C-alpha cells in the first residue's frame, strides 16, 4: 500500500512571539517551570517519579491549605478537574444547586446535567456574588445533595465569599464543591478551615504553569459519598476510585501520568512554597491595587465592587464609544500584550485583565497602564 | 486566618536519572520535542496558536494517513482519547463488540459499559489476534453498532491485522474503532485505506512525545452518528461536538488547550513528516529484527508469532527459574534501562520491551541485549 503525501506539509521551527499574557489565562509560565518541563523523562512507575508524585501532593496540600489525602493533579486541564469533581460526587437523580453568576456556573450546570443531576439554579447578575441569606433561601427550596460555587469567577472577576457556607452545608447535609481555578495560589483560600469538600483548579492562572494538568482535592465526606455510590462513576478516565489508587499508596496502573507536565507543576508548587502563601497573596493584592489606582487615574472603572473584586482578574468597563475588540487587537499587535474581552452578559462591555502568578509584578502593571492609555486615546 | 505550614516541605531541584525507557511506554521523548515543550507561551486563542493548531491537525493526518476533518489531540493522555472515541460514538443500549486479547480490550469493555453499551466480548488468548472468519462469526451473533479492535496490544505485543475488517463492518452497518496507541508512527497504519471510522493513540510511544495529549480521529460515519445522537455525550470534557468547534473553523472556546504539550506534539509530528512514514516503519522493523535475532542467539524466545509480532513492542518469555521482576530491577538500577513485566495472563511470564520512535536505534538494541544477557546469567 502506498503512503499518501497529501498532508506531509513543510513547517518551520517553532518561533512564537514574546507575548505578555495579561488576559484571564493562561498567564505566562515561570521560567523555572518552563525549564522543568523539558527535563529528561523517567517512567511513570519509576521510583523517582513515585517520589515526585508524593512531593506534588504534599506541596498541593500546602497551596490549598488542606490535609486531604486526595490532593492530586488530574491528567487534563482545569476543565477536566472540574468534570472530575462533578462526575465523582454527583449521582443520577441528585439535587444539585449551582450558583450562576458567570460563565463557569453555567458550565457546572451543563456538567451536572450530563451526570443525571436535578439541577437547581441560583441566579445573580454577572459580577456579583451570593450572600449567606441568599444561599440559605435557595437551599431551603432545593434541598440539594451538592452545592456548587465559583470562588473566583474568571468570566467576571468576582470573588464568592465562602465563610459560613460550610455550616449551611452541614445543616442541609450537602457537599460543597468550589471552583478555585483563578484563586489557587493568588487569593486567600483555606480548603479545610472553610469546610470545602471538593475543589478543583487550573495551573495556568496564579500558579504560572502551562495548562495541561488540573488540581483536584476531595475531602473525607466526598470520598465517603464516592465509596457509597450505587453505580460506577460513568467516566472512566476521571474515576477517582481508580485514579486515587494510582496516586495513593497502591500505585496501581490506571493511565500514564503526563510526566513532564508533572515536572512543571512540581516546580510551580515549589515556587509557591518558597515564596509563602501570605506573601504571594499580598503580592497579588498589592499589584492589583496599583492597577486599580492607575485605572482610576485614567478615568476607567472596574465592573466589580471593590469588596469582592479578585486581585487576580479585573473586569474593566469599556468606555462609551470605544471598540473593545480593537483595543485588545492593538495591544496584541503593537505591544505583544494579550488581554481578553467579556463573555456572555459582559460581552463587549468589559475587558478581562489578569495579573496572575509570575505576571503579578509592578513592571507589568506600569506597562499595561501606559499601553492601555495610549491605545484608548488613539 | 493563619496559614498552616504543615505541608510546606523542602524540596530539591529536579534531578532525574538518565533512564533509557525501553518498556511499553513512555519511551524517551526526542530531544527536539523536549526543547519545544519549554518554548514561551502564547494564548490558546492567539492567532499564532491557531496556525499551530492547523499544522498539528495536518501533520497528524499525514501520520495517520487520513483525510478526516477531525484529527486532533485530545487534552489528556491516550486513555482520554480512548474514552473520547467511546463516549462520542456509543449510545446507551448500543451493541458493542470488543476484541479481548489483552489488557486494552478489557479496558474498552469497561469504558463501553460505563456509557451504557450492551457489550459483547470476542475472546482470544493474550498474544494472539483475530482472523476475519472469527470476527464475522462474532458479528453475526452480536449484530453490533460498534466494533472495537486493538491494532497494537501494548500488553501482549500482538498486531491485529485490519485488512478486510471495514468491509465486514459495512456489511453489518457497524462503526469500526481501532486502538493505535502503540502503532501510530511506528507500524504501517492506513486509517482511510483500511476504512477505520475512529482511531485514537498516545504520544508517548512511537511518536516520542511525553504523555499528556491524546490523538483522536473521527471519520464521516462516526461524525454522522455523533450528530444523530438522541442524548448529549455524557462527558463534557471529551464531547467532540464541543471540542470539534474549538479545533474546527469556528474556534469556539471550550477549554484551554495544553499549549506547551501542543508545542511538543507538533515537533514530534514534524519529525515523522521529515523522516517519512515508510522510512520510519522500516526503521522500526529493522531494529526489531536486530533485537529478535539477538534474543534468539541468547536462547530467548518471543511470546508472539512472528507474523503478527509488533516491531514497537516485544514480549520476551521469561526463562524457567528466572525472576522476571529481579531482572527488570537490575536493569534499572545498574544500567538505567527500564523494561516492564507482563500484565494479566502474562504476569510473571514475559518482559515487555519497547523499541519505539526515537528509541528505535541499533545502539539501544546492542546495549539492551548485552545488559539483558549479563543480568540473566548473573
Image (spheres, coloured by chain):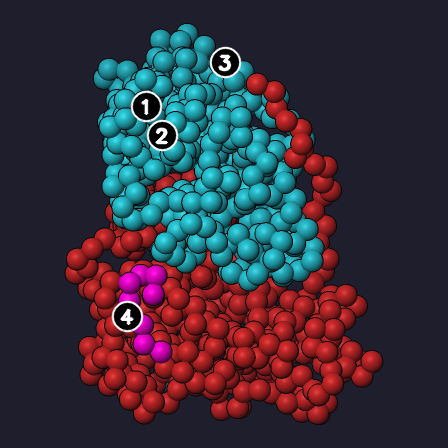
Chain colours: A red, B cyan
Up-down relation of residue B316 to residue A333 (above or below): above
| Tag 4 residue | A118
Q: Where does residue B332 sit, x and y in percent of width and height?
A: 40, 32
Residue at mark 1 to residue at mark 3: CA–CA distance:
33 Å
Q: What residue lies at 29% left-to-right and 53% top-to-bottom?
A: A234
Mark 2 burial class by Cα count in 10 Å: few <14, some 14-19, many 20+: some
**Residue A15, labelled with which disc?**
none
Name the residue tied to disc 2. B172
In this picture, residue B209 sits left or right of residue B227: right
Marks 1 and 3 on same chain: yes
- Distance in Å between CA atoms under marks 4 and 2: 38 Å
**Disc number lying in front (3 or 4):** 4
Residue on which the image places disc 3:
B290
N-term-proximal mark, 2 vs 1: 1
The residue at which mark 1 appears reads as B135
Mark 1 or 3, which is nearer the eye?
1
Q: Earlier in the sequence, mark 1 or mark 3?
A: 1
Tell which of B147 and A171 is nearer to you: B147
Mark 3 nearby-residue class (10 Å; few <14, some 14–19, many ≥20)? some
Q: Chain of mark 2?
A: B
| Separation (CA) of disc 2 from disc 3 | 42 Å
Highlighted range, magenta? A113-121
Amino acid at each position: 500500500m502506498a503512503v499518501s503525501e497529501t498532508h506531509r506539509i513543510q513547517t518551520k521551527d517553532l518561533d512564537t512571539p514574546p507575548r505578555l499574557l495579561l488576559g484571564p489565562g493562561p498567564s505566562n509560565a515561570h521560567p523555572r517551570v518552563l525549564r522543568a518541563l523539558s527535563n529528561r523523562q523517567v517512567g511513570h512507575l519509576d521510583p523517582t517519579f513515585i517520589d515526585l508524585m508524593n512531593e506534588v501532593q504534599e506541596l498541593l496540600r500546602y497551596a490549598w491549605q488542606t490535609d486531604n489525602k486526595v490532593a492530586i493533579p488530574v491528567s487534563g486541564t482545569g476543565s477536566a478537574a472540574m468534570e472530575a469533581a462533578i462526575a465523582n460526587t454527583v449521582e443520577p437523580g441528585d439535587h444539585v444547586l449551582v450558583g450562576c453568576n458567570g460563565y463557569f456556573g453555567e458550565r457546572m450546570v451543563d456538567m451536572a446535567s450530563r451526570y443525571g443531576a436535578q439541577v437547581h439554579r441560583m441566579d445573580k447578575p454577572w459580577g456579583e456574588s451570593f450572600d449567606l441569606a441568599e444561599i440559605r433561601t435557595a437551599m431551603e427550596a432545593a434541598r440539594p445533595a451538592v452545592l456548587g460555587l465559583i470562588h473566583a469567577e474568571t468570566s467576571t472577576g468576582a470573588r464568592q465569599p465562602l465563610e459560613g457556607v460550610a455550616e449551611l452545608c452541614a445543616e442541609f447535609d450537602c457537599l460543597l464543591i468550589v471552583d478555585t481555578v483563578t484563586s489557587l495560589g493568588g487569593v486567600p483560600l483555606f480548603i479545610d478551615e472553610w469546610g470545602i469538600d471538593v475543589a478543583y483548579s487550573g495551573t495556568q492562572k496564579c500558579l504560572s504553569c502551562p495548562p495541561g494538568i488540573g488540581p483536584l482535592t476531595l475531602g473525607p465526606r466526598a470520598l465517603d459519598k464516592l465509596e457509597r455510590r450505587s453505580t460506577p462513576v460513568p467516566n472512566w478516565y476521571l474515576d477517582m476510585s481508580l485514579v486515587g489508587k494510582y496516586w495513593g499508596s497502591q500505585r496501581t496502573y490506571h493511565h500514564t501520568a503526563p510526566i513532564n507536565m508533572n515536572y512543571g507543576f512540581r516546580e510551580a508548587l515549589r515556587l509557591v512554597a518558597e515564596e509563602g502563601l501570605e506573601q504571594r497573596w499580598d503580592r497579588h493584592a498589592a499589584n492589583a491595587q496599583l492597577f486599580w489606582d492607575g485605572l482610576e487615574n485614567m478615568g476607567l472603572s472596574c465592573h466589580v465592587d471593590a469588596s469582592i473584586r479578585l486581585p487576580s482578574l479585573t473586569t474593566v468597563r469599556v468606555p462609551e464609544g470605544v471598540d473593545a475588540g480593537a483595543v485588545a487587537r492593538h495591544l496584541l499587535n503593537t505591544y505583544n500584550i494579550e488581554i481578553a474581552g467579556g463573555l456572555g452578559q459582559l460581552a463587549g462591555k468589559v475587558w478581562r485583565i489578569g495579573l496572575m502568578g509570575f505576571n503579578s509584578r509592578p513592571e507589568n502593571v506600569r506597562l499595561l497602564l501606559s499601553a492601555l492609555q495610549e491605545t484608548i486615546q488613539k
